[in-house]
Image: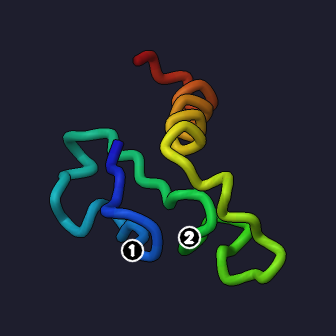
Amino acid sequence: MVLHGGPGQGVRPAGDGHFDPGLNRVILFDQRGWRRSRPDASDPGVDLATNTTRDLLADIEALLRRLSIEK
């Protein structure tokens, strides 16, 4: 799983060539509110108070469960 550097940066396909998808299962996702995630942080109605480390960890755990990946 690849975590990008923070809000506003986003991830690039296949980790920008750092991984061989033929050899590795690469999971990329954008933090809530950034790039392709919804809702977009630029929306005036979005409350960034839920963009905490605890919420990010919960998002990661939910993604792992959805993909049936054990920690």
Q: Quadrant of residue 63?
A: top right
Q: Position of residue 69 (x, y in %)?
A: 47, 23
For the point 78% across and 82% down, the residue is 44
Q: Position of residue 11 (x, y in %)?
A: 39, 66
Verify CB contact (< 8 Å) between mark 2 and mark 1. Answer: yes
Q: Which quarter of the image is occupied by the N terminus?
A: top left
Q: Which mark is residue 25?
A: none
Residue furthest to the right in view is 45
What secondary structure is marked by label 1?
loop
Q: Amino acid at mark 1?
A: Gln
Q: Position of residue 52 (x, y in %)?
A: 55, 49
For the point 42% across and 53% down, the residue is 28
Q: Quadrant of residue 55?
A: top right
| Cα gap from disc 2 to disc 1, whole angstroms | 8 Å
Residue tagged by mark 1?
A: 9
Residue tagged by mark 2?
A: 34
